[in-house]
Image: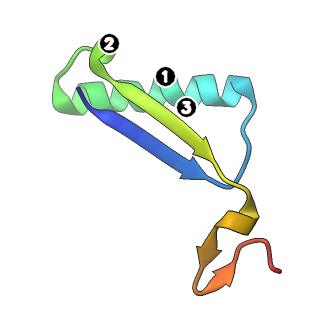
Amino acid sequence: MPVVTVEASKELTKEQKKEMIEKVSQVVADEYGLPIQTITMVIRENTPDNIGVAGKPVSGE
């Protein structure tokens, strides 16, 4: 049972999350040759204060 975790700083709408879950789950199911019912997906949304890139906070502070 594959588990896909997506972490991002941008908050998505419910509709955007629904679409992402459907599309990503289908790709993973296809690639692994598994039924889509076996795919679990978790979306974690982080505030920009909690993310750093190149040694700097994404929030710019």
When the figure is inspected, residue 25 is found, relative to residue 56, above or below; the finding is: above
The residue depicted at 80 percent of the width and 79 percent of the height is 60
When the figure is inspected, residue 9 is found, relative to residue 20, above or below; the finding is: below
Residue wearing tag 3: 20
Residue 38 versus residue 61: which sits nearer the camera? Answer: 61
Tell whether 5 sits left or right of 18: left
Q: Which amino acid does label 3 sit on?
A: Met
Residue wearing tag 2: 37
Classed neighbour count for the residue bearing mark 2: other residues with Cα under 10 Å, few (<14), some (14–19), many (≥20): few
The residue depicted at 72 percent of the width and 38 percent of the height is 12
When the figure is inspected, residue 43 is found, relative to residue 34, above or below; the finding is: below
Q: Distance between the residues labelled 1 and 3?
A: 5 Å
Which label is found at residue 22? 1
Classed neighbour count for the residue bearing mark 1: other residues with Cα under 10 Å, few (<14), some (14–19), many (≥20): few
Location of the N terminus by quadrant is top left
Tell whether 8 sits left or right of 28: right
x, y (%) of residue 17? Answer: 63, 29
Q: Do the residues labelled 2 and 3 touch (CB within 8 Å)?
A: no
